[in-house]
Amino acid sequence: MRWELDPIIAAWPPLELRYYTLLFGCGLWLAWRAGRRCFPRFELPPGDALPVLLWSSVGMLVGAHYLHLAFYEPHGFSDLRFGWDEERQSWVIGRFWNLGSGLASHGGALGAIAGLYLFWRWKKKPSGISFWRYADASILASVWVYPFVRLGNFFNSELVGRPSNLPWAVVFARYDAIPRHPVQLYEAILYSFEIVLAEWLAQRRFASLPEGVCFGGILSLHFTLRFVCEFFKEAQGVDQGWSLTMGQWLSFPMVFGGGGVAFLRWLMEKEKSAAHKYRLSEEKNEAGYHRH
């Protein structure tokens, strides 16, 4: 298969409308809809789905862009151009300011979590609702964004796979003439299974799990899938010759951090439950002692 679609639908310099933008927007809209369904199941106001989405989205864009610059394009921090270029007769936006270009999913996850935390701390902490309840509900809704981001990467002919002779290999003509793994589609398919899991958890299992377990577990699962898919992805310059890609190295803290949160929250709930049972047993024994 040969893929050479122009990723730009229309342009009004310095602005562009891309398929990536439309797909990203579609994913965010579906995440908001999922949040409206999911939040009441966690005894959260459904109206909070939109502000949570906005706070998390801003954090996601900022975190994704600046972590990308930090690990893939550090020179971008010094590219502060912004404004009309007389010589080129066009608008110029330097890499530092261009939040829509150069996004690392690891930074996006951290930024989204930071945005959610700020929303909770400033708006909801006084109400006594725990952060983990918002984190669980939010991650079950956010999984709707992931496949659409990778479809956007496919339309952009970016983050391409390694050379392949498989029947479904794709020639990304805007990149080179070599048949490659359509790794963006691999990821989109795998992330779609995360949606199935999230919907099942939201409908069937969330009530039986300690707060924070859904959040940590899905975060760990997502970056485990990302780690696996990186074996089919072309090196991105900074990781040429490495045994693992930069994406895989950055996935490690997300996998173990998410898994650690899930385990610790589960363990704390078990200890809390055991302590509660012990207190009830002691109270029962003491009541029986006084009766005698």
Image (cartoon, rainbow, N blue to C red):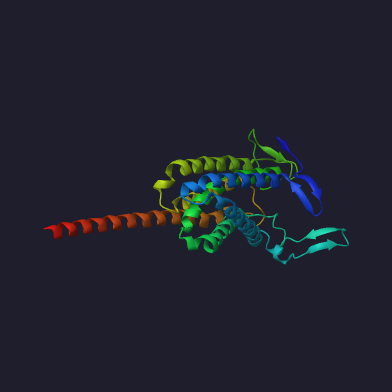
Which quadrant would residue 22 be assigned to in this image? top right
Closer to the camera, 25 or 48? 48
245 relative to 189, above or below = below
Tell me where residue 206 appears, x and y as whole percent.
Answer: 44, 46
- Residue at x 63%, y 35% (from the top left corner): 166
Horizontally, residue 282 falls left or right of residue 18, namely left
Tell me where residue 86 appears, x and y as whole percent.
Answer: 88, 62
Tell me where residue 31 appears, x and y as whole percent.
Answer: 58, 46
Taking the view exactly as shown, the residue that stands out farthest to the top is 167
- Residue at x 71%, y 39% (from the top left corner): 171
- Residue at x 55%, y 58% (from the top left corner): 116
Q: Is residue 147 visible?
A: yes
Number of callouts in the render?
0
Horizontally, residue 88 falls left or right of residue 132, namely right
Taking the view exactly as shown, the residue that stands out farthest to the left is 292
Tell me where residue 103 appears, x and y as whole percent.
Answer: 65, 54
228 relative to 73, above or below = above
Q: Is residue 225 visible?
A: no
Which quadrant would residue 107 be assigned to in this image? bottom right
Give the quadrant of the N terminus. Answer: top right
Give the quadrant of the C terminus. Answer: bottom left
Closer to the camera, 25 or 192? 25
